[in-house]
Amino acid sequence: MTFSYPNLVVMAARGRNSFIPAQLLALESHANLTVHTVPGRLTHEEMVGLCASAEIIGFTRRATIDFNAKLIDALPNLRAVAVYATGYDWIDTAKLEQRGIKLTLLPDYSTQTVAEHSFGMMLSMSRRLHLSERVARGDLPVGVSLRGFELHGKTLGIIGFGRIGKAAAHLARAFGMKILAHDHTPMSSENGVVLVDLPRLLAASDIVLLTCSLKRGTPPLIGNTTLSAMKPGALLVNPSRSALVDNDAVVQAIANGCIRGYAVDDTVFGAAQLAQIEHGRILQSAHTAWYSDEAIARGTQAWVDNLADLAQEYCVHRKSMGKVMST
């Protein structure tokens, strides 16, 4: 049996320029590497065309936001996938398992960046910074209220107490906030954090922060029932997946004065929805919570490490299979 390196196809926003020479060398040492420049979303056909012969592929959510069963089945040679992302709700993991295709993620590259962005959204909403800038530019009349409130002494309720939730709690302590936390799995206690059930968290929190994951195919976590259970005048802040929240329900809750406002790290509200409520009650940050110099550097290196490890595992497996067949 003749040994050959695996075909590795990587799709990155700037192609080979997304990597430093040492990173490209690490990949080329264990694989037949092809790097495609993919600055935006690919169609099903385009992605299949780029990856048809690949045994290992690496891509970001720029390439696709739905790595589904149909796409996976169209790649018969695929043995492993390395994605530049932390969440995996957009990936059909059941299909990958059925095919025996290994999946690697980046669970920690953007933890600090997302936690800091969460507080950026909180501060923008609490001090109305996004409105202040528009008033200063003349986009909004001077009569728009810019009166804010302090975070100090307020209660922050964190739903999803994993890496990002814990990093956010660390920042909240520096602001002098009281901290509640809830998670669907058993949690270890943290200094200054009170672990509670979801109803208590919703009823007691001045700000509810979503740092939880989204399971593929599940309904929104936050809808009419949970919004009505929140403390009157509370803020909802979502640096995670926008699909965790029912957008129509949150607009109605703001319009009815049930909650103060909603900040989401995505662009999901149209002009018609925003016209139903007062300026500034919704803040959209265009999915940039992960986007910092440090996170990109950490993430790219971790992505390369994952791709190189997958290629090495493939090589070891192929060599061992060759020995078995030769005997």
Image (cartoon, grey):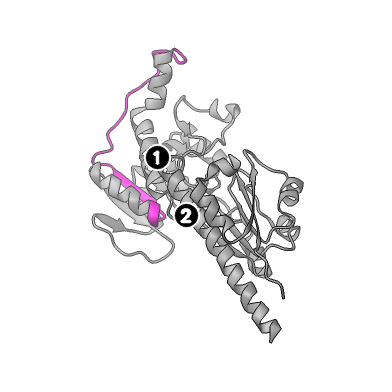
Q: Position of residue 3 (x, y in %)?
A: 67, 70
Looking at the image, is mark 2 or mark 1 earlier in the sequence? 1
Please name the predominant secondary structure of the magenta segment in the image: loop
Examine the rendered structure and indicate whether residue 246 appears above or below residue 125.
below
Spatial CA distance of label 2 from label 1 is 21 Å
Q: Position of residue 86 (x, y in %)?
A: 50, 53
Q: Which residues are magenta?
A: 138-164
Q: Which residue was labeled with disc 2? A: 302
Q: Secondary structure at mark 2?
A: helix
Q: Secondary structure at mark 1?
A: helix
Location of the N terminus by quadrant is bottom right
Judge whether residue 237 is colored magenta: no
Locate residue 135: give its quadrant: top left
Q: Which mark is residue 18?
A: none
Q: Residue at x 77, y 47 (%)?
A: 45
Q: Report whether 184 appears left or right of 27.
A: left
Q: Which residue was labeled with disc 1? A: 117
| Kind of residue indicated by mark 1 | His
Please name whichever residue, 316 or 122, is drawn nearer the observer in this view of the structure. Answer: 316
Q: Report whether 179 appears left or right of 55.
A: left
Judge whether residue 148 is colored magenta: yes
Q: Residue at x 61, y 68 (%)?
A: 314
Location of the C terminus by quadrant is bottom right
